[in-house]
């Protein structure tokens, strides 16, 4: 996705993933893990011209959505070997 901003705006962080507005929207959790989204052949280019994949050459963080009680709600699958793809899943009820 391309974002147009004024020259004064500088992004220091980016997020690629899927989002559930509220964990309450998906409760109760399904009985089996459910595929939500798949990203394939993704490439990233910074405004400075650095090219890479979702794996980098920058620092990346894997995030897992959990309820305040520690129940996993949504999680990412394994990043592809090329760093250009991953999926997110709705976790099965414990």
Image: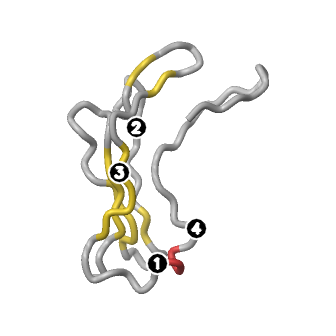
Looking at the picture, the colour scheme in use is secondary structure
Of discs 3 and 4, which sits in the foreground? 3
- Residue highlighted by disc 2: 60
Specify the quadrant that holds the N terminus: top right
In the image, which is nearer the foreground, mark 2 or mark 3? 3
- Tell us which disc is closer to us: 4 or 2: 4
Marks 3 and 4: CB-CB under 8 Å?
Answer: no
Q: Reply above or below: 62 against 45.
A: below
Crowding at mark 1 (Cα within 10 Å: few <14, some 14-19, many 20+): few
Residue 86 spot, x, y in % from top left:
32, 46
Quarter the C terminus occupies: bottom left
Q: Which residue is mark 4?
A: 21
Residues at marks 1 and 3, CA–CA distance in whole angstroms? 19 Å
Q: CA distance from mark 2 to mark 1?
A: 27 Å
Q: In this rendering, is residue 6 above or below 73?
A: above
Q: Which mark is residue 38?
A: 3
């Amino acid at each position: 996705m391309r974002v147009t901003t004024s020259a004064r705006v500088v992004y220091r962080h980016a997020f690629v993933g899927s989002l559930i507005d509220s964990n309450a929207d998906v409760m109760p959790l399904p009985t089996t893990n459910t595929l939500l989204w798949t990203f394939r052949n993704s490439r990233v280019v910074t405004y400075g011209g650095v090219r890479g994949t979702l794996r980098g050459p920058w620092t990346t963080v894997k995030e897992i959505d959990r309820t305040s009680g520690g129940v996993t709600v949504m999680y990412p699958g394994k990043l592809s070997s090329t760093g250009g793809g991953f999926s997110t899943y709705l976790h099965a009820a414990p």
